[in-house]
C-alpha cells in the first residue's frame, strides 16, 4: 500500500494562497512581483522542497560517519524555460558543509546518494502527474 500524503491549497486573494496539511501546518504562497512578495512562489517552493529533502539525508549520513557539523546549507538555483509553461530546464544544488573532520570525497559521495537515491522530491520530479477538475455548486 502506498504511503499517501495530502495538502489543501486554498485561495486567500487573487495572488495569495495557503497550503495546509492534515496536521494543520501552513505554508503561505504568493505570486506577487518581487518588490511585493510576502511568501515564496510555487516554483520557489519546489526549489526549497528539493534542497530541504536532499539536505536531511546528507546531514544524517555525515553524522552517521561521526563528522562534526558546524554549519550546513544548500544553495539551489533553477533555470526556467522562456516560454509557457516556465518549467525548470536545469536545477543546480550547491551543498556546503563546514566541518573540521569531513573529507571532500566522502561528502561528494553522500550528496550524490542523497540526491540520486534517497531524495523523494528529486525522484518525484520524474513522476507521472494526473489531475481532474471538479466544479461544486454552493
Image (cartoon, helix red, strand yellow):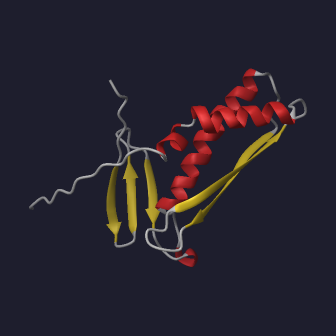
Q: Position of residue 27 (x, y in %)?
A: 45, 53
Q: Nearer the viewer, residue 79 or 9?
A: 79
**Which residue is drawn at the image coordinates 80% and 22% (left, top)?**
66
Q: Quadrant of residue 57?
A: top right
Q: Horizontal and vertical percent for residue 93?
A: 68, 50
From the viewer's perspective, is residue 30 above or below residue 62? below
Please tell me how many numbered marks the rendered image carries.
Answer: 0
Identified at 47% across, 60% down, the residue is 42
Q: Quadrant of the C terminus?
A: bottom left
Residue 73 horizontal/vertical position (percent) = 72, 46
Name of the residue lying farthest toward the left: 137
Residue 22 location, quadrant? top left
As rendered, which of 68 and 130 lies closer to the eye?
130
User: In which quadrant of the rendered view does residue 6 lie?
Assistant: top left
Q: Position of residue 56 (x, y in %)?
A: 63, 35
The quarter of the picture where the N terminus appears is top left
Comparing 110 with 126, the one in front is 126
> Is 96 on the left-hand or right-hand side of 112?
right
In the image, taking residue 126 as reference, residue 112 lies left or right, namely: right
Q: Residue at x 59, y 32 (%)?
A: 117
Residue found 38% across the figure and 62% down from its top: 17
Q: 58 or 81: nearer the eye?
A: 81
Amino acid at each position: 500500500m502506498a504511503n499517501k500524503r495530502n495538502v489543501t491549497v486554498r485561495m486567500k486573494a487573487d495572488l495569495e494562497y495557503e497550503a495546509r496539511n492534515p496536521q494543520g501546518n501552513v505554508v503561505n504562497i504568493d505570486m506577487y512581483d518581487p518588490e511585493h512578495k510576502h511568501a515564496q512562489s510555487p516554483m520557489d517552493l519546489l526549489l526549497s522542497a528539493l534542497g530541504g529533502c536532499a539536505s536531511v539525508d546528507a546531514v544524517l549520513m555525515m553524522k552517521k560517519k561521526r563528522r562534526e557539523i558546524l554549519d550546513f546549507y544548500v544553495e539551489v538555483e533553477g533555470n526556467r524555460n522562456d516560454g509557457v509553461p516556465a518549467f525548470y530546464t536545469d536545477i543546480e544544488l550547491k551543498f556546503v558543509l563546514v566541518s573540521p573532520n569531513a573529507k571532500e570525497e566522502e561528502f561528494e559521495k553522500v550528496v550524490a546518494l542523497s540526491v540520486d537515491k534517497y531524495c523523494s522530491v528529486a525522484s518525484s520530479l520524474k513522476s507521472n502527474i494526473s489531475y481532474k477538475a471538479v466544479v461544486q455548486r454552493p
